[in-house]
Amino acid sequence: MSETRYTENHEWAALDDDIITIGITDYAQSQLGDIVYVELPEVGRTLDQGEETAVVESVKAAGDVTSPVTGEVVEVNDVLNDEPELVNQDPENEGWFFKVKMMEPEQYADLQDKGSYSKLLESLS
């Protein structure tokens, strides 16, 4: 996988060829608290960049996960149906949400790199 990119909504996106794995950042899961439910998109669904794609619910709040790129959902992390706590335990690895086959690769390049995302987090603290 190549460098991970980030959105201002605290999603991460990791590129592998033309497939992007998407989840929420450690910061996002820490703000949500204990995650109790995840609703994933359907495989085959076409997404627009910024479209609300998945839902994550915790004991404190519910939130939407948006797609950082336009593309087609090619895989979802079904393990989260039975083990939503994986998002808390390992948000940027085993707790991934879905994978998208990109239709517009330049959208990935426009996402924040780790340095820019770190500056965003610093501004929030």
Image (cartoon, rainbow, N blue to C red):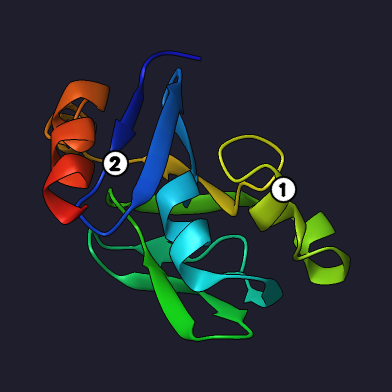
Q: Earlier in the sequence, mark 2 or mark 1?
A: 1
The answer to whether residue 99 shows anywhere in this view is: yes
C-alpha gap between disc 2 and disc 1: 31 Å
Q: Which residue is mark 2?
A: 103
Q: Which residue does the image show at 44% across and 53% down from the upper left? A: 72
Q: Which residue does the image show at 35% across and 63% down from the upper left? A: 47
Q: Is residue 82 left or right of residue 23?
A: right
| Amino acid type, callout 2 | Met
Disc 1 secondary structure class: helix
| Amino acid type, callout 1 | Gln
Q: Which residue does the image show at 59% across and 46% down from the upper left? A: 91
The answer to whether residue 78 shows anywhere in this view is: no
Percent coordinates x, y for residue 40 in the rendering: 61, 70
In this rendering, the label closer to the viewer, 2 or 1 = 1
Which mark is drawn over residue 89? 1
Disc 2 secondary structure class: loop
Q: Which residue does the image show at 28% across and 48% down from the upper left? A: 69
Question: Is residue 67 placed above or below 120 in the rendered structure?
Answer: below
Question: Is residue 23 placed above or below 41 in the rendered structure?
Answer: above
Q: Residue furthest front?
A: 125
